Amino acid sequence: MMAGGRVHSILEYFTEDDGYKCGYCKGSSSSYSNGMWAHTMSVQDYEDLIDRGWRRSGMYVYKPTMNRTCCPQYTIRCHALDFKLSKSSKKVLKKMARFLSKGEVAKGTDVEPMDSHSEDAGIDHRAVPCNSEVNVDIEKPLKIVSLEELPESAEIQENPQPDAASEKGEPGQKHASSETNVSTGSLKCTPKPGRGADPNKPPCRKAKVIRREMKLTKLLQKQQQKEMADISQYQEPSSSNPHPHPLQHHATQANKPKSLEEFISESLTPDAAHKLEVRLVRSSPPNPQFKATFQESYQIYKRYQMTIHKDPPDKATEYQVKLVPVSFDDPDFIESFNQSAALYAKYQMAVHHDSSDECNESQAENPTDGPPSGYGSFHQQYWLDGKIIAVGVIDILPHCISSVYLYYDPGYAFLSLGVYSALREIAFTTQLQKTAPNIRYYYMGFYIHSCPKMKYKGQYHPSDLLCPETYAWVPIEKCWTKLDQSKYSRLNEDINAEDENSFRDLGRVLVLYKNAVMPYSIYQRRKKGRADDEAAVRQYASLVGQTCAERMLLYRS
């Protein structure tokens, strides 16, 4: 993802339509998607694409064929500003806080599986290789592998434990189970004297009943304490204080649950046993800090892939984690690309009546009202006591943070870094919103209702799913009934709603042909029309939508 200067999305669309192995249900050739290779991609174009169900895996951008694929993948986003912590999320935050403050490692901590997220962002997804000779030697920023998040830890339900008296029995009595075995094999008889429950002792009760009563007692005690506090702090009118103030407001403040930010800040105290720091470094183009820490980050990625995903040592290559540096050294390319950019700006101003400022991609990628870091691709490095233990790959887009991938040191899996990093990224979204008011959402990739290990994303509230037909956002709670009935569903409840950005005019699709930008109608006249080409361009435009089709450059040879 390019972050500024000479930002034109140049895409190469592929029309291959064969099925491939599904990473979720493991079907041999039941997964279908459309894809294109992004030679460059602007942040606005990518945001518009993910709002139409697209997602990137490295430089390859793909869109599941929802009504055909075996495991439909619905784009999901979380309302970061209204985020509500679940019980399991609080457990992860508290576990991290205990480790940082006291060095405490919980015994018997279950290590949560990490592989479900990587499949979400393209592992086991067949990317079509790009063999074309595009004469555009520019930055190729979409190079990081995939999203890796942790599913929220499943909440453990306590099994009711039998009462101690019923388990051990009274002295001199046989165990209840032996009594049952005897009775089933013999005729009924009158119980002998001394057998049965002791009338002088209270009857046995189930453990869950006792726990319920204890919980009710605690709630009543808290209510009484609250009422006493209100009475004791209520001031009678006097000459010095003529207006008494009942402390209802203070009681409300005291009962307000902790926010996500409060949980995080409480764990980062100066006197803690361990120091955790999250650093944001730009990965496209790579800044000096990214370059200086790349080898350390790569070694963590390699251990992660080998341990969690069982990759062989030679599979986790630097190519997968490293972004290709900026390269504008070719004088011929610079001249031709500048001419193409000038033509593009001229076309936008003449045909679409855009202003010159709107055609200045440098301003579009780094606007004055944007975040201090600017937009683009970044790494969030998690430094523990001076060394990197995890790296979260994110895209900062005009209206959201899009989580791409997470990899971590397997030695710290007990900290549930997938969930913790997701919570930190949600907190980071709310932090950016203070300086960039348009940033309000946290995109989590795909939600797959038919795959049990991918349904965990629905636990982040409040969240929306993207309707695959109208591309409108629908609260996830309204989607569950439909998805229970059918894996693929039109989520929008308005039967009259349509795709407002649907493809309308093939002639206005922009193409890049011989380093020149032109509408498809002019390209057709130059090429004298090709039936197979027109069908491919029509399919491309219908999938990306009319807005992106008129703004992005479709490469034609």
Image: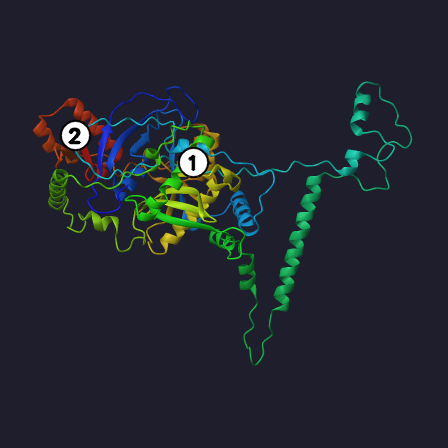
At 79% from the left and 39% from the top, the residue drawn is 203
Residue 280 position within the rendered picture, expressed as x and y whole percent measured from the top left: 37, 49
- Alpha-carbon neighbours of circle 2 within 10 Å: few (<14), some, or many (≥20)? some
Q: Give 197 or 56, whichever is nearer the viewer.
A: 56
Which residue type carries mark 1?
A: Cys
For marks 1 and 2, give the CA distance.
40 Å
Q: Earlier in the sequence, mark 1 or mark 2?
A: 1
Q: Specify whether 529 is left or right of 127.
A: left
Quadrant for residue 229, please give it: bottom right
Reading the image, the residue beneath label 1 is 479
Q: Can residue 507 be seen in the rendering of this structure? A: yes
At 19% from the left and 49% from the top, the residue drawn is 358
Rendered view: 275 above or below 527? below
Of the 4 image quadrants, the one containing the C terminus is top left
Which residue type carries mark 2?
A: Arg
Rendered view: 325 above or below 360? above
